[in-house]
Amino acid sequence: MTVGLIPGSFDPFHNGHLEVVERASHIFDEIVVAAIRNPQKSEALFDLDERRDMISESLVHLANVRIVSISTLLVNVAKDVHATAIVKGLRAVSDFESELQMAQMNRSLSGVETMFIPSSSTHSFIASRLLREVARYGGDVSPFVPAPVAKRLAAMFPGDTHDVL
């Protein structure tokens, strides 16, 4: 059985993430989506349990996907879930440099290969960091996120939050 492990902070999970999971679900027998608390990133908008719930609700249409949250080395999780490969989405060439270094480190540590799936041009500009900023200032991010995520963001940032100068 082939298992693809898709790690990310997913804060929040967006349509670019959804595209990578959907495409990988056709390649692997099972997909494990691993929500990670990334200490290199700013304070999380959603905690790991909230992210896991949003991801699960957003992927209910895919029978071969399961969601976990982790706070350990990715290669340890890959071993635990018997991952055939780590799957990473690429939005732009700029993503490739850092992702390549991580792929090489993960392979050196564990022997697990990394597979890259480039996002379509319709999702290449979407970044969780940008979505958090737009939502905080009252912008509509619903075109860029699955409905369960849009609902939570709307509840977190209700109404117009623009300051008048």
Image (cartoon, rainbow, N blue to C red):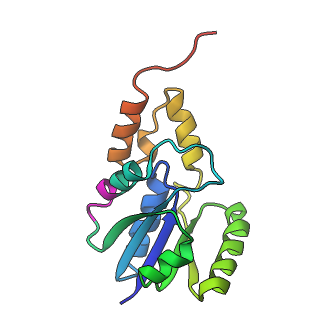
The reply to whether the magenta stretch includes residue 57 is: yes
Residue 116, can we see it? no
Q: Which quadrant of the figure has residue 94?
A: bottom right
Number of marks present in the image shown: 0
Give the answer, above or below, for where 79 lies relative to 33: below
The residue at the point 45 percent across, 54 percent down is 15
In the displayed structure image, the side of residue 142 where residue 112 appears, left or right: right
Expressed as whole percent of the image width and height from the top left, the position of residue 142 reads 41, 40
Expressed as whole percent of the image width and height from the top left, the position of residue 74 reads 55, 72
Give the answer, above or below, for where 62 lies relative to 157: below
The reply to whether the magenta stretch includes residue 18 is: no
The residue at the point 38 percent across, 48 percent down is 50
Expressed as whole percent of the image width and height from the top left, the position of residue 56 reads 32, 58
Give the answer, above or below, for where 26 lies relative to 72: below
Q: What stretch is highlighted in magenta?
A: 56-61
User: Quadrant of the image for the C terminus?
Assistant: top right
Q: Which quadrant of the figure has residue 89?
A: bottom right
The residue at the point 47 percent across, 59 percent down is 17
**Toward the viewer: 139 or 84?**
84
Expressed as whole percent of the image width and height from the top left, the position of residue 69 reads 43, 62
User: Quadrant of the image for the N terminus?
Assistant: bottom left
Residue 32, can we see it? yes
The residue at the point 42 percent across, 67 percent down is 33
- In the rendered image, the residue lying farthest to the top is 165
Give the answer, above or below, for where 136 lies relative to 106: above
